[in-house]
Amino acid sequence: MNGIVLALAAAALFGAGTPAAKALLAGFPPQTLAGLLYLGAGAGLAIIRVAAGARRVETGRSLDRRDLPWLAGAIATGGMLGPLLLMLGLSRTPAAGASLLLNMEAVWTGLLAALLFGERVTGRVWAGMGLIWVASAALSWEGRLAWGGAAGPLLVALAALCWGADNNLTRRIAGGDALLLAALKGLVAGAVNTGLGLWWSGGRLDTARILPALALGFLSYGLSLWLYILALRALGAARTAAWFGLAPFAGAVVAVAVWREPVTAGLVTAAAGMAGGAWLLLGERHRHAHAHGRLVHRHPHWPGHHPDHAHG
């Protein structure tokens, strides 16, 4: 299959996951839904990983004891806190706005990489992050006026912060098998969040929605990652990352089409600002790829290489 088609399919599945999850929130507490989504993704990826057998799409070194703190941190931030905060934010925020706010992940990833890990950040990257930050602030301010407060956008931004931390933590174990690590994260974090959600709600569960939630998790997170890896093989890292950068905008389009959310001036302005910021960031990745050889990028929220500077 054409690599661009694979990358676009991965972006569409991942982007559509946010508005689709909003439809399921009526049947679950946010923590339970966050857990079921990751359980579905983890289980599906585990099946793919086992089925691939000797023909694994991506190999890597085995994990050792030194990797466990980094893996635990990635599971806690990216597998548990990130999806929980997103579900809480979605319950208070229109799906289109929440989808666009997930562009903040790139900003947090870059800031944490520069502040905590001493990575060099160019002026182009700072400009791109600044545009996304301003657009996100504008979107949150519109939320304060029209959405009954800034709590929802703030929770989505905090979810993006958790995934930015996840990106930096998983860089430390980037040499491992991405599918194996992603399956492990989904199964462990999904089981913990589901268990805590059931405990918090007294064991109440809308059984009719369990399979849809698991299926959504597999499609939006699991299958999307699988397609992303296949696109990497066909296109290389920089071009795949550029096409996958359309995911938040795909989510906003789905939200407007499915939920009939209004297309406000603030939403359009924020989308334009985030698109400009994303273009600056992706342009930097493309230049970096040409300067240093083929990069191996990771699917957002799942283990693999750092999205900007990890070398394959």
Image: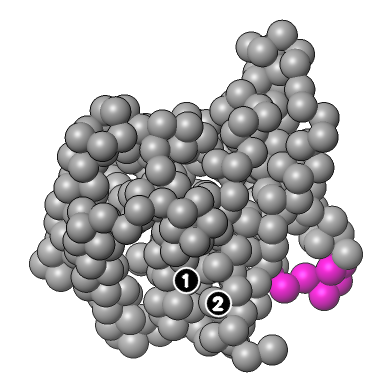
What secondary structure is marked by label 2?
Answer: helix
3D distance between C-alphas at marks 1 and 2: 6 Å
Q: Is residue 69 left or right of residue 58?
A: left
Task: Please name the amino acid that badge 1 sits on.
Answer: Phe
Q: Residue at x 88, y 64 (%)?
A: 51
Q: Is residue 190 left or right of residue 288?
A: right
Which residue is more in the foreground, 146 or 308? Answer: 146
Q: Position of residue 89 (x, y in %)?
A: 42, 34
Work out whether 92 lies above or below 240.
above
Residue at the extreme bottom: 2
Which residue is more in the foreground, 213 or 165? Answer: 213
Residues tagged 1 and 2 counted as in contact (Cβ below 8 A): yes
Figure quadrant of the N terminus: bottom right
What secondary structure is marked by label 1?
Answer: helix
For marks 1 and 2 on the same chain, the one whose residue lies earlier in the sequence: 2
Q: Examine the image and state in which quarter residue 265 appears.
A: bottom left
**Residue segment shown in magenta:** 52-58
Confirm whether residue 167 shows in the render. no
Q: Residue at x 35, y 65 (%)?
A: 308
Residue highlighted by disc 1? 244
Q: Is residue 207 left or right of residue 265?
A: right
Q: Residue at x 33, y 81 (%)?
A: 286
Work out whether 125 lies above or below 102.
below
Confirm whether residue 216 shows in the render. yes
- Which dot marks residue 7? 2
Q: Is residue 5 left or right of residue 122?
A: right
Q: Residue at x 55, y 41 (%)?
A: 22
Residue at the extreme top: 202
Q: Position of residue 50 (x, y in %)?
A: 86, 59
Q: Crowding at label 1, few (<14), some or many (≥20) Cα neighbours within 10 Å?
A: many
* Residue 206 in magenta stretch: no
